[in-house]
Amino acid sequence: MTSHKLTREGAVPTRTCKPALVLALTLCVPLSLAACGDGADDDAVSGQGAQTAAADAPEDRSTITLGAAQIAAAGIAIARPVVGGAGTIELPALIEADPEAMQVVSAAIGGRVVALTRNLGQAVGKGQTLAVIESREAAMLNAEVDAAQARLALANANLAREQNLFAQRVSPEQDLLAARTAAREAQIALRLARQQVSAAGGQGGALNRIAIAAPIGGQVIARSVTLGETVAADAELFRVADLSRVSLTFSLLPQDAGRVRAGGAVEVKAAGRAARARIAYVAPALDPATRQVPVIATLDNRSGQWRVGEPVEAWVTLAGSGGSSAIRVPSTAIQTVSGKPTVFVRTASGFRATPVTLGARAGADVIVREGLSGAERIATTNSFTLKAELGKGDVGEGDVGEED
């Protein structure tokens, strides 16, 4: 009984103890394993935390990583800022004849053109005949000149006779004075007749013709008549210009015109040619049509390389504002990032957004007062793509945070 009881009692504990031991062991093993593994897991967690901390560390959001191929594909041009001077403006300009060295040739009388002695582009000297016009009015003018010459010859003959008679004490002094006055009047009449011919635009010709003379020496740059054509009085026949000096005309914005003075330099450029001109005139009023300021510069053309009517590029030097150490960048290089004017400076791995302080505009350029030294290489065109890339990085980081 006892044995059975013991056996039974022992069996009972055995049956109750085994599950308890199993449970204790089951609980103990994970706890011990967990306790034993704390050091290794802490190291792993610690390393992972360090990596997470490194990943979460704030990065330089002003930089953009781009390779040379990506820069070329985006069409981004890179150049250095211009340092020195007060700035220049690149403008379209036009070569024109110098207004002080060009004249319109016309005839004050109407008639038929019976001769043309010069064609377009040909040289002509002052006083040389350009055309001959035939008309009744020309005949009347020429006849008046002939009559005045005849009256003068008669008056001079009478004066000589009266002087001889007065010397011989045959004629009174009163007759001598009258003859002298008549001769003087005849001279005046002849001069008047010749001036009428000159006012008609030419020189006296044979019979009913009048020759149209060049008022200045130069080249024929325009011809409005053809041989045999009947022209009206005061009609334009030719334009003659001395092209050894030409004019350069262009327009400035009012804010730029205030920084340009007479005598300032202008660089003139065209295909394969370049020269320097000097500003001669800056209009004191805006052009009503363009609301800009007309400017005229003079250009030496003794070599004949510039042609009237030719479009060229003018680089106008601005005065003041910025001094000799001014830094200028194209306006296309400026972007607004976080409300600040920004220039993208080239780095070894891409670009860095650099805030700058701007000064006055200089045509297509802008003066940079602070932020650049002038030695940097900057993005001058398509810089807006860099601004978009910079904004894309900010948006991407915000999206990741929302997903976490």
Image: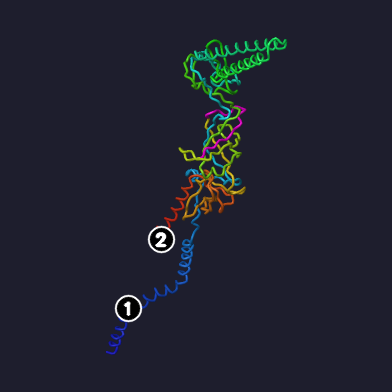
Residue picked out by circle 2: 401
Q: Quadrant of the N terminus?
A: bottom left
Q: Secondary structure at mark 1?
A: helix
Q: SS for tag 2?
A: helix
**Mark 1: few/some/many CA within 10 Å (<14, 14-19, 20+):** few
Marks 2 and 1, how far apart at CA: 50 Å
Tell me the amino acid under the disc marked 1: Pro
- Please tell me whether residue 205 belongs to the stretch shown in magenta: no
Left or right placement of residue 184 versus residue 228 in this view: right
Q: Which residue is mark 1?
A: 19
Residue most extreme to the bottom: 2
Nearest the camera: 289 or 357?
289
The residue sitting at 60% across, 45% down in the picture is: 85
Give left or right: position of 240 versus 404: right
Q: Between 115 and 94, which is closer to the camera in this rendering?
A: 115
Above-or-below relation of 86 to 248 = below
Q: x and y percent of residue 118 in the render?
A: 55, 18
Horizontal and vertical percent position of residue 18: 33, 79
Select label 2 or label 1 by which is in front: 2
First-in-chain label (2 vs 1): 1
| Residue ranking furthest to the left | 1
Whether pointer 2 and pointer 1 mark residues with C-beta atoms closer than 8 Å, the reply is: no
Residue at 49% across / 47% down in the picture? Answer: 383
> Magenta span covers which residues?
293-309
Q: Residue 207: x and y, percent?
A: 54, 10
Instruction: Tell me the kind of residue under disc 2.
Output: Gly
Q: In which quarter of the view is residue 186 placed?
A: top right
Point out residue 331 in the picture as x, y percentages from the top left corner.
51, 46
| 157 is higher (above) or lower (below) than 23 | above
Q: State the quadrant of the C terminus.
A: bottom left
